Image (tube, rainbow, N blue to C red):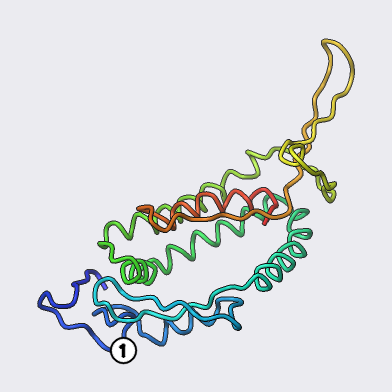
Amino acid sequence: MTSTTPAGTGQQATSGTIGGVAGAPSASRAQELVSRAAGGKDSAPVQMTAPFTGEPIASLPQATDADVRAAFDDARAAQRKWAVTPAVERQQVLTRLMKLVLDRQQEGLDLVQVESGKSRLDAFDEIAATALASSYYGKHSAKLLGQEHASAPQKRCGADAAVPQVRTRGAGARTRGERLRCPVALRASFGRWRWRRPRCACSRRAWPSPATGAR
């Protein structure tokens, strides 16, 4: 889909595609993607519609409090192993993510357009920003972090939890500082859906976390 035309402007909406938008991926593809969403089995789904046609896109499951708590428990367990994964290996994961975004950019552009009603150019802005952010941290995170403390981080509470641990050696003018970076266990990012580039905002805030060993 290289362009989209709203219904009623000379081009008929196409049944069998997401949101009835001509050239969009198939409706079955939407269901396949939705089936990967976790949680929300016991709550009423949210119906999304395509701005171009006003037709349904998909029904998204809502997460209950129990779903959120379960997701946090799973992420917390996975983070303990991720925290001691070498920074270079974490870089490789982000680099693979960048390649996947670029390899599937045509479908990504289609989905952004169908969901938001954006032009192709504006949709590309979001895809490109996501790829650039993952590429940057995939290349530079190990260098930015320097030498990491490989052992499991000690739990700290309050304001100190956000401050890197610092160890000093020696005294007076010869004092040497050694910074030990210990990732926080979990981090949540909330995107402003009314902002011009909500996906870009989420990706730019999300990628530093896995790069530093957090989740």
- Answer with left or right where residue 141 lies relative to residue 35: right
Q: Secondary structure at mark 1?
A: loop
Q: Observer-nearest residue: 108 or 163?
A: 163
Question: In the rendered image, which quarter contains the C terminus?
Answer: bottom right
Determine the residue positioned at 53% across, 62% down: 97
The residue furthest top is 173
Q: Examine the image and state in which quarter residue 54 appears.
A: bottom left
Task: Give the tally of numbered discs.
Answer: 1
Q: Examine the image and state in which quarter residue 5 appears.
A: bottom left
Q: Observer-nearest residue: 51 or 211?
A: 51
The residue furthest right is 170
Mark 1 closeness class: few <14, some 14–19, many ≥20 residues within 10 Å: some
Determine the residue positioned at 82% across, 44% down: 156
Q: Position of residue 65 (x, y in %)?
A: 65, 70
- Answer with left or right where residue 63 lies relative to residue 18: right
**Type of amino acid at the residue the image marks with label 1:** Gly
Where is mark 1, residue-wise?
16
Q: Is residue 138 above or below residue 109?
A: above
Question: In the rendered image, which quarter contains the N terminus?
Answer: bottom left
Q: Position of residue 56 (x, y in %)?
A: 34, 81
- Answer with left or right where residue 154 lies relative to residue 142: right
Q: Position of residue 179 (x, y in %)?
A: 77, 33
Q: Is residue 183 above or below residue 70?
A: above
